[in-house]
Amino acid sequence: MEKINEVVSRIKPIPQSAYDNVKRRLDNLTKPVRSLGRLEELAQRYVAIRGVDNPKLEKKVIFTFAGDHGVADDGVSAYPKEVTPQMVLNFLRGGAGVNVLARHVGADVIVIDIGVDYDFKPSNGLVIKKIAKGTKNMVKGPAMSRDEAVKGIEVGIGLAEEWSEKGVDIVGTGDMGIGNTTPSSAITAVMTGETVEDVTGRGTGINDEAFRKKVDIIKKAIRINKPDAKDPIDVLSKVGGYEIAGIAGLILGAASRRIPVVVDGFISGAGALIALGIQPAVRDYIFASHLSVEKGHKAMIKKLGNNALLDLNLRLGEGTGAALGIGLVEAGFKILTQMATFESAGVSKGNE
Amino acid sequence: MEKINEVVSRIKPIPQSAYDNVKRRLDNLTKPVRSLGRLEELAQRYVAIRGVDNPKLEKKVIFTFAGDHGVADDGVSAYPKEVTPQMVLNFLRGGAGVNVLARHVGADVIVIDIGVDYDFKPSNGLVIKKIAKGTKNMVKGPAMSRDEAVKGIEVGIGLAEEWSEKGVDIVGTGDMGIGNTTPSSAITAVMTGETVEDVTGRGTGINDEAFRKKVDIIKKAIRINKPDAKDPIDVLSKVGGYEIAGIAGLILGAASRRIPVVVDGFISGAGALIALGIQPAVRDYIFASHLSVEKGHKAMIKKLGNNALLDLNLRLGEGTGAALGIGLVEAGFKILTQMATFESAGVSKGNE
């Protein structure tokens, strides 16, 4: 917990002046003022976050945290639990959605076994930081101990710090874990104050009966465990998951190193809600990549106070939306750094 | 006009079976069914449009048509008319927004002088197909003769045919022309039946007074010229522009060659409305890249029957939104062609 406190104390809100400095540069480029809308906002935020004069945007990494969930035994997912390790192996071979979209935007994918119920052999691109072989079933008690939740967050922080030293410019979050929309909905309900019904969706695609059961399970887990919304680590440990802990830690660690974080969809959003609860200033370092189909995501995005960039009916997770979001942030950054100015191009200014 | 009729007769609606074939392939990939939402729709449409078994998506070209407008003399823009040729030169040097975003997605930019009031020297990346040095002022009579409008469309068709032979896989539309939101609003009002007030915006950023004047000018141009909504070429010639004609032709030509067209914002949308009026089946070949800030764009997108992919508050034109849209279509195509199947990856299927 000392590590978390130390990192959290280093995260500061971005001052308005940092955004204004970039705006002045943007307004000299050969285009009507603000005519590139959110791309300009992305450029502004990216440079303001980095906090140096001429930052680069080259090294892009998506961290896909994988963990299993005790609650999956209760049939909350359309997929069997063995799919978690199977998909990890698919990530490592480069055949999953996140691999394709990461390659498309020139990002690397790092997969973290933070709590999968399977023993992986060492492999390129796989970081083994297993805390346990999945969480316990949150319907029967806390998913993790407080100590395990803290360790999970510290894994994410450690990765952010390690990759900050390696010169990473921007990170994306991702997840894999059969059953993990269930803890994510539980976290959203507790942290936003919305009802469980309002923040629970169909995950990978369960039927009506399984959906009703899922809502009941989440309600029961909250009733039994009594997570304290004022104590995000309590919420995380009781109704969360290891991959969610890792994502929360990655966000905190990246913010403390002034590295922008592009947050994926619903599971990553649950991690972001935990990070935001621990340190509200992380909001300034987060880009919400897309609005997920998953029902609770709207409430999450609202709480994060950060309009989603894309609305493409995605609901895969893994970091797929984060990859597309990174591509957009880079597009905005290139507008700032590669466009001609009115003066350099000899273009007349308007009278706006 | 013979050329146009011949091309139009070759454009056929895409049969549902073509989409279904791609869907079957998508549903075997290692992800819950439809979990990549609109990316899967893009892959489906791209492959269905191409109409061959294993199309590639490599050669991407954005065609930015430039023309001047007689109506600009009446102060409908925040920028002086000389900015049209200045920006063309900026495009050719690679310093404009469209150049930056085209490079970002790996697309080339071809600039077409179809009606600029300036004599360009020959240059790499510039196609000179000038029909006139700008349109006439549509407040005083037709912007072009019917013959000039037909010629403008034929320029676009010719480019699509030439680049089809060169193996282009996907094209984007773009525009440059000071004052060109004015004819675009006029076309939108006539072709959608909305009021001028409802489809007129602030273009590059005019003030309240100039805005009121712009609405009056558009109303007057429609009153004087009486464009016939049932005859799109009549509308184009009376209240359109050369770049809009070129865009309409590019769309028709590309559709006739089964090349997908990613349509940029408001000006390109005016061209798309003309193409759609001439041949409703072009709808199947169009991707609407983004929803522009420009007020009339919503009515346009609705008429095109094609949900916009992005909503990033863009209003620059040039093909900037088309570039981002091409990047998304390619992302969807790579999902289809690069992801592992359940079988190849040894991943268990769900019970959706």
Image (tube, coloured by chain):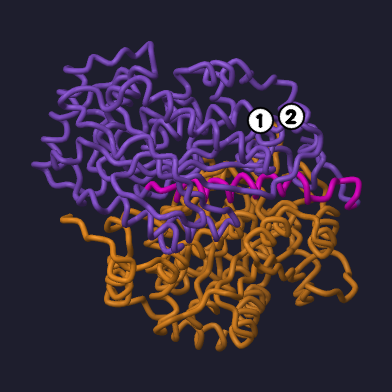
Chain colours: A purple, B orange
* Helix, strand or loop under label 2: loop
Report the residue marked by disc 2. Answer: A51
Reply yes or no: does residue A331 show up in magenta: yes
Residue A58 location (% of width, % of height) = 69, 50
Question: Which sits in the foreground, A138 or A184?
Answer: A138
Say which amino acid is labelled 1. Answer: Arg
* Helix, strand or loop under label 1: loop
- Magenta-drawn segment: A317-345
Q: Is residue A210 left or right of residue B271?
A: left
Identified at 36% across, 46% down, the residue is A176
Residue B43, disc: none
Residue A72 location (% of width, % of height) = 20, 40
- The residue furthest left is A209
Instruction: Answer above or below: position of B302 versus B123.
Output: above
Report the residue marked by disc 1. Answer: A258
Judged by its main secondary structure, the magenta piece is helix
Instruction: Answer above or below: position of B109 versus B36.
Output: below
Instruction: Answer above or below: position of A241 versus A318.
Output: above
Residue B210 location (% of width, % of height) = 71, 37
Question: Which sits in the foreground, B259 or A242?
Answer: A242
Say which amino acid is labelled 2. Answer: Gly
Q: Quadrant of the C terminus of chain A?
A: top right
Query: Would residue B226 be seen by someone viewing this image from the given angle?
Result: no
